[in-house]
């Protein structure tokens, strides 16, 4: 037989039980683009999709060499909504699972293009912009997946 009565249940859960939200740890958020990066994003979006030349939105590269896995406004590539957010059947980069799967599917190296594009960021009239986009569109056409 018990000598002392049972203690009542805890009113508050322990902090390490994962149920307490104390708000002291800030969620990691992407910082807003600065002026130079915003200008670069607008220029890249104006080029049209690297695959089909439709109006583009920008895809932020997550797996560039020497870069932490975090959204960086310097490394972006132009893709239309289908090739950006489309499922695996449509050949979208997010539907396929990432840049390496996209490269295997379409033959287009988004990481390499985005890194080269940032190096030409201050030169909007450089031949790189039209030549590289035309080259990757031709590579994508050769895959016969359009």
Image: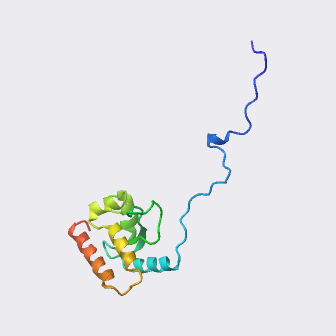
At x 34%, y 85%, the residue is 126
Q: Specify the color scheme.
A: rainbow
Q: Is residue 54 above or below residue 70?
A: below
At x 75%, y 15%, the residue is 2
At x 44%, y 72%, the residue is 74
Q: Is residue 55 visible?
A: no
Extreme residue toward the bottom, this view: 125
Q: Is residue 33 left or right of residue 51?
A: right
Q: Is residue 19 above or below residue 71?
A: above
Extreme residue toward the right, this view: 4
Q: Quadrant of residue 113?
A: bottom left
Q: Is residue 83 visible?
A: yes
Q: Is residue 24 left or right of residue 2?
A: left
Residue 104 at x, y percent in the picture:
27, 60
Q: Quadrant of residue 26?
A: bottom right
Extreme residue toward the front, this view: 66
Q: Is residue 59 above or below residue 11?
A: below
Q: Quadrant of the N terminus?
A: top right
Q: Is residue 138 above or below residue 104?
A: below
Residue 77 at x, y percent in the picture:
38, 71
At x 78%, y 21%, the residue is 5
Residue 53 at x, y percent in the picture:
32, 76
Q: Quadrant of the C terminus?
A: bottom left
Q: Is residue 72 left or right of residue 89?
A: right
How many labels were placed on the picture? 0
Q: Quadrant of residue 63?
A: bottom left
């Amino acid at each position: 037989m018990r000598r002392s009565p049972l203690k009542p249940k805890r009113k508050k859960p322990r902090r390490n039980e994962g149920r307490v939200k104390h708000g002291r740890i800030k969620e990691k958020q992407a910082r807003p683009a600065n002026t130079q990066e915003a200008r670069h994003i607008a220029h890249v979006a104006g080029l049209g999709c690297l695959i089909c030349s439709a109006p583009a939105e920008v895809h932020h590269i997550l797996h560039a060499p020497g870069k932490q896995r975090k959204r960086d406004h310097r490394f972006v590539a132009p893709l239309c909504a289908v090739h950006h957010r489309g499922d695996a059947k449509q050949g979208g980069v997010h539907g396929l699972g990432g840049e390496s799967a996209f490269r295997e599917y379409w033959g287009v190296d988004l990481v390499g293009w985005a890194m080269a594009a940032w190096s030409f960021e201050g030169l909007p009239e450089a031949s790189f912009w039209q030549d590289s986009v035309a080259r990757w569109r031709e590579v994508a056409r050769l895959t016969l997946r359009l």
